[in-house]
């Protein structure tokens, strides 16, 4: 059952009960038919109420189609109308109930059948009323089917909107999380780069200059200065290592990328190969962070969106740049319309190191993400 049905199901019960009781009361009060016919008709309506309370409500709440009880209601309705034609006013409760109990196609058939009950009774009891009652039945059936279709469509649209809102909220939360992570990573990389390029380099220069002035360090003051500079150099390198991603702290960039691919394969069951070309060399921390984060994000996109059977990662060291390529054979997407998928975060990181990000995607060829950074 949809959330809309769950929210208003008790009011459907009240509506059905009010209409059924009102018709049953009117049947009992009327004096145009024998008392036994009125009593039996009212009793049949009472059975319909009991069936609804004991069977229909449970079936409707679990969203389970039940043509059997719908047919039971149609039969009971036909008995009531045969005994007392005034009972045809139960159509106001019958038609919505039918649409709740069965699917659209079966509901259309049963609505037509239930509207033809009165003209069918007229064939045996009041032939002179057949034409007018048949016209009324056709109008009632058409109106009931249209209203049923319209209400169901409105409910479906509300459900779709609710799902879309939930997806948008989830996407917004994901974007906020990725933006936060990107900001934190960028700041850590910036600090690591600043420490490496200023403090660490400065201490190295001080040590070099002091040792050049007194290679044997016979002057105790120069020896103390060198020791102090080396200690501070070690501290600055420790800070750089602490600010770098944990994956990079455990090894080189190629090793870290291989670990990410192995983790991807272990979590998804999708094979992911890693190939490294060119001469491996140490890169600035901020460049390694950008390349590693891009590999992580690209593999995350493959896991979440691609439905791929395999993935491949290439890390190519060139003379003046390093290129990261992540390919998959999934169903692809439209890069021009994709604001999410972590692509914005990857582009932002690429801009931080003057790199360029290229995204190629096709439903038949899968997706290729290429990041090239000068290094």
Image (cartoon, rainbow, N blue to C red):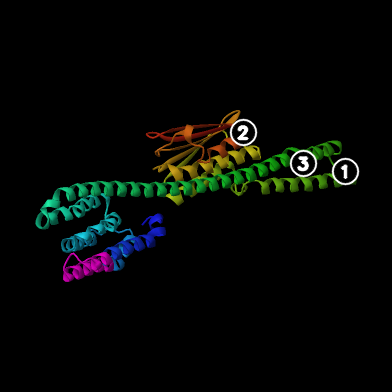
Q: Is residue 256 magenta?
A: no
> Which one is in front in this view, the residue at disc 2 or the one at disc 1?
2
Q: Which residue is mark 2?
A: 351
Q: Which residue is mark 1?
A: 222
Q: Nearer the viewer, mark 1 or mark 3?
A: 3
Name the quadrant containing residue 36.
Answer: bottom left
Dot 1 or dot 3, earlier in sequence: 3
Image quadrant in which the N terminus is located: bottom left
The residue range painted magenta reads 24-50
Q: Residue furthest front?
A: 31
Is residue 269 at least partly visible in the picture?
no
Q: Position of residue 344 (x, y in %)?
A: 55, 37
Is residue 72 visible from the viewing direction of this image?
yes
Residue contact at pointers 2 and 1, CB within 8 angstroms? no
User: Was residue 29 drawn as part of the magenta stretch in this picture?
Assistant: yes
- Disc 3 marks which residue? 199
Classify residue 93 by image quadrant: bottom left
Where is residue 290 drawn, in percent x and y?
Answer: 60, 39
- The foreground one among 92 and 375 is 92
Q: Residue at x 12, y 51 (%)?
A: 128
Give whichever of discs 2 and 1 has the lower sequence position: 1
What SS does tag 2 mark? helix
**How many residues crowd around disc 2 within 10 Å: few (fewer than 14), some, or many (20 or more)?**
some
The residue lying at 13 percent from left, 57 percent from top is 121
Q: Main secondary structure of the magenta part?
A: helix
């Amino acid at each position: 059952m949809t959330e809309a049905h769950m929210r208003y199901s008790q009011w459907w019960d009240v509506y059905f009960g009010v209409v059924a009781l009102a018709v049953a009361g009117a049947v009992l009060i009327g004096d145009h038919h024998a008392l036994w016919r009125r009593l039996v008709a009212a009793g049949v309506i009472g059975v319909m109420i009991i069936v609804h309370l004991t069977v229909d409500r449970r079936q409707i709440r679990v969203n389970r189609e039940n043509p059997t009880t719908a047919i039971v209601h149609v039969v009971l309705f036909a008995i009531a109308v045969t005994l007392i034609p005034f009972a045809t006013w139960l159509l106001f409760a019958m038609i919505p109930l039918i649409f709740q109990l069965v699917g659209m196609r079966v509901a259309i058939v049963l609505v037509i059948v239930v509207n033809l009950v009165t003209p069918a009774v007229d064939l045996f009891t009041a032939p002179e009323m057949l034409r007018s009652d048949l016209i009324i039945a056709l109008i009632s059936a058409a109106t009931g089917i249209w209203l049923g279709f319209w209400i169901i469509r409105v409910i479906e649209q509300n459900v779709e909107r609710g799902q879309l809102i939930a997806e948008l909220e989830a996407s917004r939360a994901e974007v906020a999380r990725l933006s936060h992570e990107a900001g934190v990573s960028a700041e850590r990389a910036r600090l690591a780069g600043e420490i490496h390029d200023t403090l660490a380099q400065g201490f190295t220069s001080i040590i070099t200059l002091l040792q050049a002035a007194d290679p044997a360090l016979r002057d105790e003051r120069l020896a103390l200065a060198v020791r102090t500079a080396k200690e501070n150099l070690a501290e600055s390198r420790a800070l750089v290592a602490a600010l770098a991603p944990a994956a990079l702290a455990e090894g080189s960039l190629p090793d870290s990328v291989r670990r990410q691919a192995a983790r991807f394969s272990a979590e998804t069951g999708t094979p992911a190969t890693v190939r490294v070309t060119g001469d491996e060399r140490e890169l600035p921390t901020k460049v390694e962070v950008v390349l590693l984060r891009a590999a992580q994000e690209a593999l995350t996109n493959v896991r979440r969106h691609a439905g791929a059977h395999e993935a491949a990662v290439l890390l190519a060291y060139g003379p003046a740049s390093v290129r990261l390529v992540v390919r998959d054979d999934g169903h692809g997407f439209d890069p021009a319309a994709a604001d999410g998928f972590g692509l914005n975060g990857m582009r932002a990181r690429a801009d931080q190191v003057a790199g360029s990000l290229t995204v190629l995607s096709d439903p038949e060829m899968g997706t290729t993400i290429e990041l090239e950074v000068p290094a």
